[in-house]
Amino acid sequence: MSPPISAACEGSRATLQPCARGMTAFRTLDDIEVAGKRVLVRVDLNVPMRDGAVGDATRIDRVAPTLTELAGRGARVIVASHFGRPRGKPVAAMSLGPLTEPLSRTLRGLPVRFVPDCIGSEAEATVAGLAPGGVALLENLRFHAGEEANDAAFADALARLADLYVNDAFSAAHRAHASTTAVAERLPSAAGRLMQAELEALGQALQAPERPVIAVVGGAKVSTKLALLANLIEKVDCLVIGGAMANTFLHAQGIAIGASLHEPDLAADARRIMGQAEGAGCAIVLPTDVVVTREFREGAASEAVPTADVPQDGMILDLGPETCARIEVALADSRTLVWNGPLGAFEIAPFDQATATCARAAARLTEAGKLLSVAGGGDTVAALQGAGVLGAFSYVSTAGGAFLEWLEGRTLPGVAALEAARKP
């Protein structure tokens, strides 16, 4: 589990610059007076549950700083979140009720009142009864179809509960839902501490980075990351491509890859990306040696071979030591790193070695103050956790889809709504 964020910039190491206190593109908690006010806080409590208990409390931990700060400043805090995909109707198994106690524990024992609906007279009465510093947890927003439909009437009902709106759910910012966009248009709005930390970390990594900038991108499919790669080659100085998606790039160069997973129909796209990278002055690092096996299982016999010598029945499941050494040199030559995706089949040994080796190299450089490292999306958190370096990167995002869309250069509706609220 990544460390909880206890202030705007925490959850990241000292290599991140101090949080700016001047004008940003969005308001933060520093810009709003909350004492005695009803504050609707959009968070992401969509946590894994196992037998009725929270399986991983990372997302609860990460929103705790915003909620405790607001309560400590005398706000009447109204917590709103989605959970699962109930498709616009109540589903008992997707109720947020079971999170009341875990949320209270994370808030250092602060009592949390659960409200069995997120709008309506009962919700309004419960909020009206909150004392300054009190916290209420609303029922699952997605129990109403109006949430995902970004319905005006539903947004009006939510807005009636509060005087101010705080969005602390970057992981839901890529959705134009009522609680992420429409409510921000109806109430004075600001970013919570987690949202602020995410946006500032990503801004430092891609919008105003210290150069040279290196991106490490892995995973299985090129098809899911075409937009990401196209955006990154215009922003970074070096792009490392690993995982099974590297196989498609090798195939596109006419290199025989045996029985390895790849997407042959995307060979032209891979060649186009390589050509665009050359034109943009972005160096692409592809494997020169790989680890191959004849069977995909834990502890399977394997060997490292040059990419030109992959056997016909061999499967590439990891990068080889020579390629890892090249990546380590590239990392040492860089000042900013963006990492998305594992470099091999990290779930099973021994095919986790490239991911672990390169992640540990990045962690050492980060801890030495030589590299700002931002990672997130997909299996990245699990891969870095497996390498034992999750807490050593400058910032690790758990936002998933929102993180990927940000890397693709897309406008995130939830962020755009906060930026619009900042404008006079």
Image (tube, helix red, strand yellow):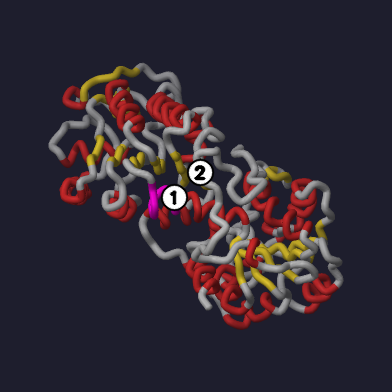
- SS assignment for the magenta stretch, majority: helix
Q: Position of residue 297 (x, y in %)?
A: 42, 25
Residue under the point 47% across and 41% down:
379
Q: Are there few (<14), some (14-19), or many (20+) residues within 10 Å of tag 2?
A: many
Measured as percent of width and height from the top left, residue 311 is found at 21, 23
Q: Is residue 72 visible?
A: yes
Q: Between 198 and 218, which is closer to the camera in this rendering? A: 198
Q: Dot 1 corresponds to which residue?
A: 204
Q: CA distance from mark 1 to mark 2?
A: 8 Å
SS at mark 2 in the image: loop
Magenta segment = 203-209
Residue 118 colored magenta? no
In the shown orientation, is residue 423 left or right of residue 288? right
Q: Residue type at mark 2?
A: Leu
User: Which residue is rendered at x = 54% and y = 57% of the image?
Assistant: 170
* Rendering coords of residue 87 (x, y %): 58, 67
Of pointers 1 and 2, the one earlier in the residue sequence:
2
Query: Where is residue 255, by image quadrant?
Result: top left
- Residue at image mark 2: 16
Percent x, y for residue 381?
51, 40
Residue type pointed to by label 1: Gln
Please tell me the numbered disc located at residue 417.
none
Residue 204 is a magenta residue: yes
Left or right of 299, for residue 418: right
Question: SS class of the residue under badge 1?
Answer: helix
Of the pair 375 and 207, the residue shown nearer to us: 207
Above or below residue 386? Residue 150 is below
Residue contact between numbered discs 1 and 2, judged by CB atoms under 8 Å? yes
